[in-house]
Image: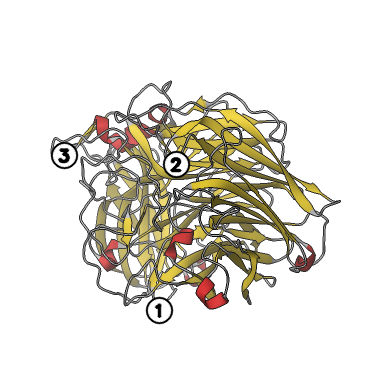
Amino acid sequence: MKKLLFLFICFSFWNLNAQQPLRYSGQEKEVSITKPTTELDYTPSKSSFSKTSSSISTPIGQAPNGFGCAFGPLKPLSAHEGLNSIAMIHRSDFNTNGDNSNGSLRYDISTDGGTTWNTNVGPIYNPAGGTGVYPGPSRYPNAILFNPNGASSASNAFMALWGTTYLNQNNWYGGQLMGTHKLDNSDIKIRVDSSSAEMGYPTVSKAFWKATETTIFGVNMNHNDATSYSDTIMVYKGVWDNTNDSLGFTKTDVYLPLGTNSNGDVVYADFKVAFDLTGQIGYILVIGYSTSYPVYGLYHPIIFKTTDGGNTWSAPQNINLNTLQETISNMTLLKNYQDVDSTWTITDLSTAFDGDITVDKNGNPHIFVNICPAAISTITGNGNTGNEFSIYSGINGMVDIYSTDGGATYKSMIVGSPQSFRGSFGTDPSNPDVTEDNRPHLSRSGDGRYIVYSWFDTDLSIWGGTDNNFPDWWANVYDVDLQSTPIGAINMTDDISNSGVNTFGNVAPEAWGPTNNKLRLHCVNQILDPNTNDFYAPTQMNYLAGDYPLFIGIREEENAHFNISDCFPNPTRSIVSLRLELDFSSDFDLVVTNYLGQIIESRELGKLQLGQHKIEIDASNFASGMYTVTLQSEGVQLSKKFIVE
């Protein structure tokens, strides 16, 4: 990917002994979740045969700084396929726009599918007062495009707003912002619930979902004060009111006590909400620690379910990561990780600190998270263990934890293997303003058949080091009907060039299509000034429209000059073979990767002549599991899978 490289002073690896709780401050870093992790003791190799897909890059609006889209996957970007419209909400670059503060909100919108944009529209929220004055400046806004009246044009549709506001003099959140904005800018209705012992004290909310065109859900976590979660999830249900042309929100409390770490801090890292196509079946995801979980010191998914449109919710359900079956390898997820490196003793798995959830066409949930060895119970190759609620991010898989029976039971599937985990941004790399992890996002096609996994990862073969400071947007797609990921992970930003430093993006929960056997995906990232890397300076936002192909070899086969057979015998215990048929002679390379994307074998086959050839791989020393063999020639690559018993 062609980016303008500027000098990063290498910031040190994460302290193995650092265990930091949720932290809230009155600085611009406010309400950042300082996520514990450990240093990269092990860096997995990565296949160089990565599929790529061109994306369209378009500059859109500006923000007062880089913080509006920071601190994990958010929901500021919404794409309405029926209206051919995309909108991005963000804080206002108030000095340029003349708004009251950087807590004012504006948005960018395209009504022609992302080709042209009307930028910095608004303000749609412009509080007169500063911190401590109701309704307070907003932070980290979310938005959803919806069309409750079935309008034929976007101008008669609406945008739902969701965010938090500063209400208190001691510089922490306490206001829940809810709003309804008509896209012709003729009407906007804003409501801010003040914090109180009765209403609850909300924190930054990343949980916002359109259940139907007339029903919107937002979720927040109730805090006792600025730093401490209590025991209650606040679920807001917004129902369209034709009389007032607005969403009327009502609140339901859902009980969720959580465990604490050794310092007495309640342990949770992220939360999301999602519904099925009917708007009746929904799930709340919390990544945290429950005292009923069998192993202390681990993050894990906690799930609530509703079957009546959010009126009532089930008791919390813990998902045990260690016992999950991994679909492709037909082994437990834990066994997959144990097989990566024999010098590690991995007893338990943990999620990392960000996650997302969506619901497929059959009403089944998909939870997308990083899964890594739990540091507290893993002995690494150097004989060390880590601390409670930390991970060893050197063995890192992007994992779909999903159900096929409505959430009664769960299984897993590894859909990506990042080269890097955490990146840092800011003028001082030794004390960065923002750190971001792989930032998992989920999107869903309009019919619920396709589930799209997105994450952000740095190509270390280009940038060197181990840090995720130059993140590319990666995607993989699961076909619910075929129960497979037919293409594999694709670098969606490989052909994009920007005159700045790409930070991590936000991906819309809506995927469009398929059209011409491709899904259209939507992403917005922020571009920092390459000369300063200053997160406090105004930033340029960039819209990325990416097309993901849905059939194996759709790009390669257009120019393919060879074909390969399936592997045989399959499964195998020793030698596995495949046939290669050439239309003309050319040079070939071969690579074998395991299911975590690590290279097991690579070799140059040299120049092969026109006709048929037999390729053999000795798998007698391979660990049990799923493998992929890829042949590449003149920019074309084809792959087949095989299993070692």
**Residue neighbourhood size for the residue with mark 3, other residues' Cα within 10 Å, grouped as few (<14), some (14–19), many (≥20):** some
Position of residue 512 measured from the top left corner of the image (x, y, whole percent): 64, 59
- In the image, 165 versus 553, the foreground residue is 165
Instruction: Determine the CA span between mark 3 and mark 1.
Output: 41 Å
Corner quadrant of residue 397: top left
Q: Is residue 108 above or below residue 291?
A: below
Q: Secondary structure at mark 3?
A: loop
Q: Secondary structure at mark 1?
A: loop
- Residue type of the residue flagged with mark 2: Ala
Position of residue 238 measured from the top left corner of the image (x, y, whole percent): 71, 44
**Residue neighbourhood size for the residue with mark 1, other residues' Cα within 10 Å, grouped as few (<14), some (14–19), many (≥20):** few
**Residue 359 visible in the shown view:** no
Instruction: Determine the CA span between mark 3 and mark 2.
Output: 40 Å
Residue at the spot of label 3: 381
The quarter of the image holding the N terminus is bottom left
**Residue 489 visible in the shown view:** yes
Q: For this view, does 523 lie left or right of residue 620? A: right
- In the image, 573 versus 313, the foreground residue is 313
Residue at the spot of label 2: 226
Q: Secondary structure at mark 2?
A: loop
Corner quadrant of residue 432: bottom left
Q: State the mark number for residue 44.
A: none
- In the image, 191 versus 532, the foreground residue is 191
Q: Earlier in the sequence, mark 2 or mark 1?
A: 2
- Residue type of the residue flagged with mark 3: Gly
In the displayed orientation, state which residue is furthest to the left: 382
Q: Earlier in the sequence, mark 3 or mark 1?
A: 3
Residue ID at (46%, 54%): 488
- Residue type of the residue flagged with mark 1: Ser
